[in-house]
Image (spheres, rainbow, N blue to C red):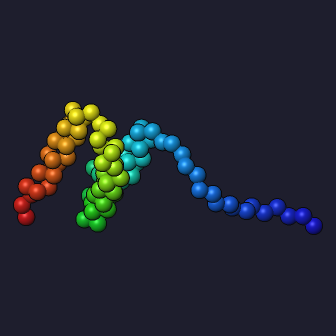
């Protein structure tokens, strides 16, 4: 008697992904937390917000100093000013 059976085999592979793929993945990952219309649900709770920021932090930390150094000075300046501006928004909040 013969039977058919699926056998899953895991193998590590490396793939190249472009920045558009990364952008799309981030948009998808954070959409559920940041969208205004959550299908009648309340807005994001503190846990969801902290998870989103933890993921953002991990993404930013993944850039090496060498990768950052490869950017043109004008690009580093724009990125640095943007991140500083966003940081000020959170630091300025009073409870």
Left or right: 14 in relation to 92? right
- Residue 88, percent from left and from top: 11, 51
Left or right: 18 in relation to 50? right
- Residue 47, percent from left and from top: 29, 66
In this rendering, the answer to whether 12 lies above or below 70 is below
Query: Quick check: can you spot residue 16?
Result: yes
Q: In which quarter of the image is residue 3?
A: bottom right
Name the residue: 27% across, 62% down.
50
In this rendering, the answer to whether 34 lies above or below 50 is above
Left or right: 2 in relation to 23? right
- Residue 81, percent from left and from top: 16, 41
Name the residue: 73% across, 62% down.
7
* Quadrant of the snapshot with the C terminus: bottom left
- Residue found farthest to the right: 1
* Quadrant of the snapshot with the N terminus: bottom right
- Residue 32, percent from left and from top: 36, 53
- Of residues 50 and 9, the one drawn nearer to the viewer in this rendering: 9
Q: Quadrant of residue 18?
A: top left
Left or right: 53 in relation to 80? right
In this rendering, the answer to whether 28 lies above or below 42 is above
Name the residue: 29% across, 56% down.
57
Query: Quick check: can you spot residue 30?
Result: no
Number of numbered markers = 0
């Amino acid at each position: 008697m013969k039977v058919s059976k699926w056998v899953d085999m895991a193998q590590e592979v490396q793939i190249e992904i472009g920045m558009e793929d990364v952008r799309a993945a981030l948009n998808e990952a954070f959409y559920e937390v940041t969208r205004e219309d959550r299908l009648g649900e309340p807005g994001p709770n503190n846990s969801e917000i902290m998870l989103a920021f933890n993921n953002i932090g991990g993404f930013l930390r993944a850039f090496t100093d060498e990768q950052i150094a490869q950017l043109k000075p004008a690009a580093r300046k724009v990125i640095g000013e943007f991140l500083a501006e966003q940081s000020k928004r959170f630091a300025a909040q009073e409870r």
